[in-house]
Image (tube, helix red, strand yellow):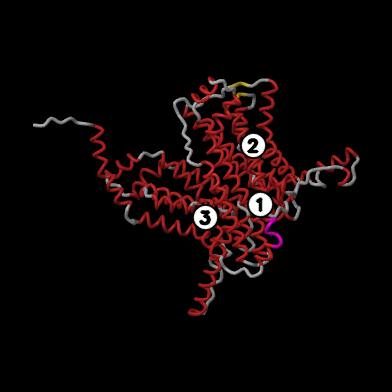
Amino acid sequence: MQDTQTNPAGAASAALQVPNQRARSRSSRLDGWTLGILALAALFFSPMLAVLGIALDNSGDAWTHLASTVLGTYIGQTLLLIAGVGAGVLVIGVSTAWLVTLFEFRGRRVLQWALLLPLAMPSYIVAYAYTDLLEFAGPVQTGLRQLFGWHRPGDYWFPEIRSLGGAATFMSLVLYPYVYLLARAAFVEQSQNLWDAARGLGHDTWGCFVRVGLPLARPAIAVGVLLALMETLNDFGTVDYFAVQTLTVGVYRVWFGMNNTPAAAQLASMVLVLVLVMAALEHIARGRRRFQFSQSAPRRDPIACLHGARAMLAFLACATPVAFGFLVPAVLLGASAIGSEEAAVGVSTLGLAFNSIAVAGVAALVCLCGGLFLAYGARLSGTGFVRTATRLASIGYAVPGVVLAVGVLIPAAALDNLIDGFMRQYFGTATGLIFSGTLYALVFACTVRFLALSFGSVEAGLTKITPNMDAAARSLGHRPAGLLARIHFPLLRGSLMTGAMLVFVDAMKELPMTLILRPFNFNTLATHVYEYASYEAFEQAALPALAIVAAGLAPVISLSLGFAGSRRSSH
């Protein structure tokens, strides 16, 4: 008789071989999950396709007129704004992340989470607050004129607030946390051994940062800058208030001012192309290089302690963005809210808050269900085709809100006209607006734009659940739906809550899509702030603006606590 030996690892591999083969065979055919993913991907990607399709229509002489008048200005100011914001968030985000990660100084423990606070402050609200403070009739210039006896603007120099430079400055102050958060996480994950080796080769702290820390953190920094630039392209309130003629403003003006949908879609297509070019340039710049972190000795504590003047400079470098990006605007909003007619403004704010919460809550729920379905379906299938479909479904976050509004409203209006014509012809009744100009269109646009937030949160949570748990549950007879309900859903509660909260707050702040897609006589906190700020009635806009900021503090605090918790668990 042939002697055999038992290999536990081989037995386990053999035991899992049949379920894995079944999973592969199941993923190779079109089951219900795969068909559902493909249907959702087609639905959520349809606004982008609609924009490209509408752009192929004849715009008449509008495009020729734009090309000969303002198109060059739109493109030039958009590129300059992107360059200014990109440089601003890069310098602020990387420098503050480096200081709070590598150095110990007084106030560091507070600043490391306070640096995230500007995320709660929408850029258009910061622009309104600082304009009210710094414009010619504002308290700063008025005080300077009284102090030095100046009477006319020509008597002194003061930077122009409503300008391209002002827009880039204020947007950098609220968007740098994207770079700070990712850069700091990258610095924390870097191995201490690499820094010790660099110091052993004669490099000082600055040399270690330039030669080791910065190159290894490059992918995370690039993603943070790209996210900030996408938010810059999406911004409408700041650039419109400052009279900066970007492509986003051009889409809005051509659509509603010239009433030319194809020309607006053509401008929107240029914005889409710009987003794709930015992502492609980052990918090309990275090339074939791969970045990996050794976890043999992750960084636990700062490597240097600062004292005296150096500690003060480090504190000021980190405190300044927090002060100008959050504290000063918050104080200005509070002072304006106190000076307003509190009773009338308070009653109005309650109604606006209800509208905002209703839209944001429904959008968060839809995004949560859609993100869970897509992420879990991709886990079940595992094929490249399905993963590509999920990426297409969640690409809306990279598309500016004005562009999405074009892609949602025009097809919805065409569908409404088709249904209304059919009902009139065969049943003698008019259906009116069913999709366009209703909350359905607004919620759908918010879902398309913010689905990536919930999908990313669920996908990150699923990566922490070992496939062995799926195999064990399947061996006990659980179907995919039962596996999701009994195993994954309880383990994903934290990720689901994080994704829903991020979608809720971003939908509360969303301005361009809400302005275009909202029903008649329907206002939210964001549209109310925009309208009153446009009329220079900042006091009436202050309390709703504070409500938006208060809603934005929830995810910022959770991000801070989550980052601190991850660091404690790594220790």
Q: Alpha-carbon neighbours of circle 1 within 10 Å: few (<14), some, or many (≥20)?
A: many
Q: Position of residue 499 (x, y in %)?
A: 50, 45
The number of callouts visible is 3
Q: Position of residue 518 (x, y in %)?
A: 60, 60
Q: Earlier in the sequence, mark 3 or mark 1?
A: 1
Q: Quadrant of residue 174?
A: top right
Residue lying farthest left? 1
Q: Is residue 245 left or right of residue 408?
A: right
- Disc 2 or disc 3, which is closer to the eye? 2
Residue under pointer 3: 448
- Disc 3 or disc 1, which is closer to the eye? 1
Q: Main secondary structure of the magenta part?
A: helix
Q: Earlier in the sequence, mark 2 or mark 3?
A: 2
- Residue 78 is labelled as 1
Residue under pointer 2: 91
Q: Amino acid at mark 1?
A: Thr
**Over which residues does the magenta segment extend?**
68-73
Q: Earlier in the sequence, mark 1 or mark 2?
A: 1
Q: CA distance from mark 1 to mark 2?
A: 20 Å
Q: Position of residue 30 (x, y in %)?
A: 34, 57
